[in-house]
Amino acid sequence: MQDTIFSISGNLAMLGWLGLVFLPGQRVVVEVIARIAIPVAIGILYIFLMATNYGSAPAGAGYGSLDAVASLFTVRGLLLAGWIHYLAFDLFVGSWEVSDARANGIHHLLVIPCLFATFMFGPGGLALYVVVKLAYRLFRARPVEQTA
């Protein structure tokens, strides 16, 4: 069952990412499907996994130290929940990047590498997007020099 949940959640997330890359102008794709529907669906799977597996965590497992978190992930169902956590939140962030870029006039071709980085490296992709956004603002704020 956990392999099925892994597959379903991964395929749902991939559907959202493909929508962000190839249909960035479709608000329903970006703001409803990728930002709300898919993360919530994955979130329901997360709740199920946490509810059915948290009691199996070994003594000392928890969130108070790196060793305690590592102990949580010795339970396969909690490891899967952690993976699903990444899928849902990274997709949410990717949808925000697309919306924010559109609102700020940043061309989508500049956003695609940020989406890939967010998909692969989560917070690193968000940091890249912020750098792109700041660079875009600085570039746009510079006055164009006239040649006579």
Image (cartoon, rainbow, N blue to C red):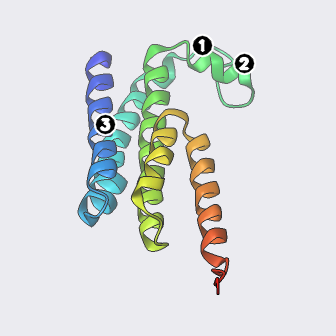
Q: Residue at x 33, y 48 (%)?
A: 21
Q: Residues within 10 Å of mark 2 (few under 14, many from 20)?
A: few
Pick the residue in front: 99 or 44. Answer: 99
Relative to 147, is 104 above or below?
Answer: above
The local secondary structure at tag 3 comes to helix
Q: CA distance from mark 3 to mark 2?
A: 31 Å
Pick the residue in front: 66 or 140. Answer: 140
Q: Which residue is mark 2?
A: 67
Residue 47 locus on image (x, y percent):
40, 37
Q: Which residue is mark 3?
A: 14
Q: In the current view of this chain or complex, which residue is farthest to the right?
A: 65
Determine which of the numbered discs, if any, sits on residue 132 in the image. none
Q: Which residue is mark 1?
A: 58
Check disc 1 and give the amino acid type.
Pro
State if disc 1 and disc 3 touch (CB < 8 Å).
Answer: no
First in sequence: mark 3 vs mark 2: 3
Q: Residue at x 40, y 35 (%)?
A: 46
Check disc 3 and give the amino acid type.
Met
Q: Quadrant of the C terminus?
A: bottom right
The local secondary structure at tag 1 comes to loop
Q: CA distance from mark 3 to mark 1?
A: 33 Å
Check disc 2 and give the amino acid type.
Asp
Q: In the current view of this chain or complex, which residue is farthest to the bottom?
A: 148
